[in-house]
Image (cartoon, coloured by chain):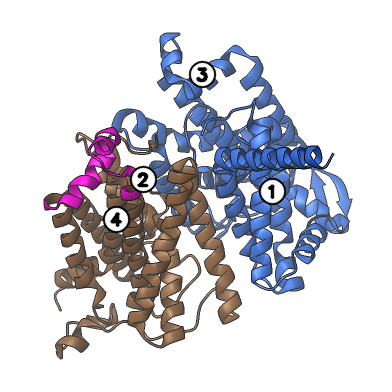
Chain colours: A blue, B brown
């Protein structure tokens, strides 16, 4: 499956329709009316100002981890380690924001974000080294690094970096490191983080499609032999892109700390790293469409408890929706072909009928 | 009881689900189909085993349900990647996600609970069958499930099949050179699909061990990355049955050691020990230099 921009939309749309139909059928099978389901998800995600702020807040890490996966995928790598990179990035960001509290705000906040990104990038590095030197598939190494990161950070916050309580968390970060709110609604607030993430996505899209470096990075993924013959080093670009990917996931973690939670705690990420995979593949691996898939996944995420309250369906249903859509999008070439073939047949049949009747 | 003996028994217990899943993954990958979906298959197996044991009252039928669920999950992966042209890794990830979602959803739909299923009868233990007490010192473990020897026997059986039977040869032919296999009159798709189903059955059984062999209930996401460890064992064992077997024993030992140490060495935080199997796996992958060669046609569908 290669990102194929020409026919992608014509195949993506049928795949999404088929996926949505399967999800509806499944919902009907467990006794929820499909329309009611859609309405519940819509109201849960966008029905009130609080819900909308909640959804936009959840969109930020999904955009960044989605971008991380999409970027690596363009260079021919699959980064399944966003979860771990996000966790170490978040802890690094929180630690810097706590230990360097003496710095002024305009230095502290960027420093915290940069250190998160840096640590995230470093955490991704062993995977690409293992791939180059030991031919270990990066999916395995990044998955193992996830578990390592989560356990390591859990140890660090219950020991050396913790606030001393049994909660397994760091102290709250210095107020200067908190991202300022731009929008208030009751106790909830929205920071500039979603806008920042969105800009980063478009910047990445521009970088990939409009610059020489981006072209080199893409060529390594789309046609390694041609890239090699053109003198583009696959190993160097894959290392760079993979570390960039890790840095984006780390940045997502640091942003979560500075903009939302204001501290790091055990089991920090509720699966944002894995959702990044879904976000990236639903958007066909293209950063300029990530906002749409991230928005969709964030809506599902913020509506999940309403499924439980309103319809008495387990919140796990949103994973089923994601998985079905992901499967359909992965199979979109065949589904799309079949869809258009059936459509063409119907069209010729109706034309034939009209012809016969006329 | 001697601590070393205890550690060995614990190793066998910890290795059992990994062994079943890893050999399932091995069969699948030798036929040329990438299988990172073991996690999802195990989870389906674990849930269906509980469901079967609860619905029929017999843990043996529960085991059968678990195996069938593993096959179903595997069939989804195989259909998507062999028939519908999906990227095999993406399809694996989707199956893992689907399993995590569906098991949680059905847990609520069928049992009306969140998180943990009600307790059901578990498979008999060895001491009940042998009519004598197996060692169970200081309650670290209650007994050895009947599934442990079955798992090791099955693994040996798979090894023998791959080595000495025609079916094993055909399977490997599909993974090494599908063109040659097709030229010899074999249906590559059918063999790969059957291999995936067999792999799914083993992985489902591994999951069933977790829910009705080890515990007697289902806990959401109870596989906790064991499926990924199993596939890491396949890579570490260089796609050779004996290698995979040793890799699984190694991971089982690390897992056992981490539990054993965290109970005895309370001065150290438990999280460090929890990370031990993954750290050991990563270290061995990084420093073990061997000729590591996957089946030539792995991940390739013509």
Q: Which residues are magenta?
A: B164-191
Residue A105 colored magenta?
no
Q: Residue at x 33, y 68 (%)?
A: B205
Distance (Cα) linking label 3 and label 1? 31 Å
Whether pointer 2 and pointer 1 mark residues with C-beta atoms closer than 8 Å, the reply is no
Q: Percent position (x, y) of residue B238?
A: 23, 42
Q: Which residue is mark 4?
A: B22
Give the CA distance from mark 2 to mark 3: 32 Å
SS for dot 4: helix
Q: Say whether mark 1 and mark 3 are on the same chain.
A: yes
Between marks 3 and 1 in the image, the one whose residue lies nearer the viewer: 1
User: What chain is tagged by disc 3?
Assistant: A
Which image quarter holds the C terminus of chain A? Answer: top right
Would residue A143 be found to the left or right of residue A332 on screen?
left
Q: Residues within 10 Å of mark 3 (few under 14, many from 20)?
A: many
Relative image position of residue A282 (x, y in whole percent):
63, 42
In the image, residue B16 above or below residue B235: below
Foreground disc of the pair 1, 4: 1
Q: Which residue is mark 2?
A: B189
Q: Which residue is painted at 64% across and 70% down in the image?
A: A29
- Identify the element where label 1 is drawn: helix
B42 or A205: nearer the viewer: B42
Q: Which residue is mark 1?
A: A17
Q: Position of residue A76 (x, y in %)?
A: 47, 29
- Given residues B179 and A203, the one toward you in this image is B179
| Contact? badges 3 and 4 (CB < 8 Å) | no
Answer with mark 2 or mark 4, whichever residue precedes in sequence: 4
């Amino acid at each position: 499956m290669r990102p194929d921009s020409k026919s992608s939309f014509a195949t993506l749309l049928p795949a999404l329709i088929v996926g949505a139909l399967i999800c509806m059928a499944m919902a009907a099978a467990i006794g929820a009316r499909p329309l009611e389901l859609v309405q519940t998800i819509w109201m849960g995600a966008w029905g009130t100002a609080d819900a909308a702020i909640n959804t936009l807040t959840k969109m930020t890490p999904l955009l960044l981890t989605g971008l991380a996966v999409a970027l690596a995928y363009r260079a021919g790598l699959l980064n399944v380690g966003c979860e771990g990179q996000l966790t170490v990035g978040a802890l690094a960001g929180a630690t810097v924001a706590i230990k360097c509290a003496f710095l002024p705000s305009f230095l502290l906040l960027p420093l915290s974000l940069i250190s998160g990104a840096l640590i995230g990038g470093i955490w991704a590095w062993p995977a690409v080294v293992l791939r180059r030197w030991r031919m270990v598939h990066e999916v395995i190494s990044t998955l193992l690094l996830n578990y390592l990161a989560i356990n390591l950070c859990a140890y660090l916050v219950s020991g050396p970096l913790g606030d001393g309580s049994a909660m397994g968390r760091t102290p709250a970060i210095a107020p200067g490191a908190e991202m300022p709110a731009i929008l208030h609604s009751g106790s909830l607030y929205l920071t500039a983080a979603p806008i920042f993430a969105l800009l980063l996505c478009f910047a990445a899209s521009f970088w990939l499609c409009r610059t020489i470096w981006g072209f080199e990075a893409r060529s390594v993924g789309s046609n390694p032999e041609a890239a090699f013959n053109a003198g583009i080093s696959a190993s160097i670009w894959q290392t760079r892109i993979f570390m960039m990917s890790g840095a984006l996931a780390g940045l997502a973690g640091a942003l979560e700390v500075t903009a939302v939670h204001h501290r790091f705690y055990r089991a920090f990420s509720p699966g944002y790293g894995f959702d990044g995979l879904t976000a990236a593949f639903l958007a066909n691996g293209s950063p300029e469409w990530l906002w749409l898939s991230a928005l969709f996944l964030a809506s599902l995420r913020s509506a999940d408890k309403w499924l439980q309250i309103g319809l008495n369906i387990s919140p796990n249903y949103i994973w089923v929706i994601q998985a079905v859509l992901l499967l359909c999008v992965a199979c979109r070439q065949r589904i799309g072909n079949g869809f258009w073939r059936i459509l063409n047949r119907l069209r010729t049949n109706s034309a034939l009928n009209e012809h016969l009747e006329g | 009881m001697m601590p070393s003996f205890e550690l060995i028994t614990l190793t066998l217990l910890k290795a059992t689900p990994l062994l079943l899943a890893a050999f399932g993954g091995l069969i699948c990958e030798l036929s040329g189909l990438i299988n990172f979906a073991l996690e999802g298959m195990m989870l389906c197996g674990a849930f269906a085993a509980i469901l079967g044991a609860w619905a029929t009252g017999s843990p043996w039928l529960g085991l059968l349900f678990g195996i069938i669920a593993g096959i179903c999950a595997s069939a989804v992966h195989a259909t998507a990647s062999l028939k519908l042209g999906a990227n095999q890794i993406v399809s694996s990830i989707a199956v893992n996600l689907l399993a995590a979602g569906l098991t949680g959803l059905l847990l609520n739909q069928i049992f009306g609970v969140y998180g943990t299923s009600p307790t059901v009868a578990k498979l008999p233990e060895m001491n009940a069958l042998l009519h004598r007490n197996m060692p169970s010192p200081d309650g670290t473990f209650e007994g050895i499930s009947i599934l442990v020897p079955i798992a090791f026997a099955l693994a040996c059986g798979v090894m023998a099949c791959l080595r000495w039977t025609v079916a094993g040869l055909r399977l490997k032919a599909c993974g090494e050179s599908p063109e040659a296999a097709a030229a010899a009159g074999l249906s590559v798709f059918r063999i790969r699909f059957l291999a995936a189903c067999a792999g799914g059955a083993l992985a489902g059984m591994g999951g069933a061990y977790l829910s009705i062999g080890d515990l007697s209930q289902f806990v959401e996401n109870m596989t906790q990355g064991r499926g990924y460890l199993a596939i890491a064992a396949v890579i570490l064992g260089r796609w050779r049955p004996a290698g995979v077997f040793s890799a699984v024993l190694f991971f089982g030992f690390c897992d056992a050691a981490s539990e054993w140490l965290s109970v005895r060495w309370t001065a150290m935080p438990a999280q460090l020990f929890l990370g031990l199997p993954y750290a050991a796996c990563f270290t061995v992958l990084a420093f073990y230099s061997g000729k590591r060669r996957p089946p030539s046609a792995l991940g390739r569908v013509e």
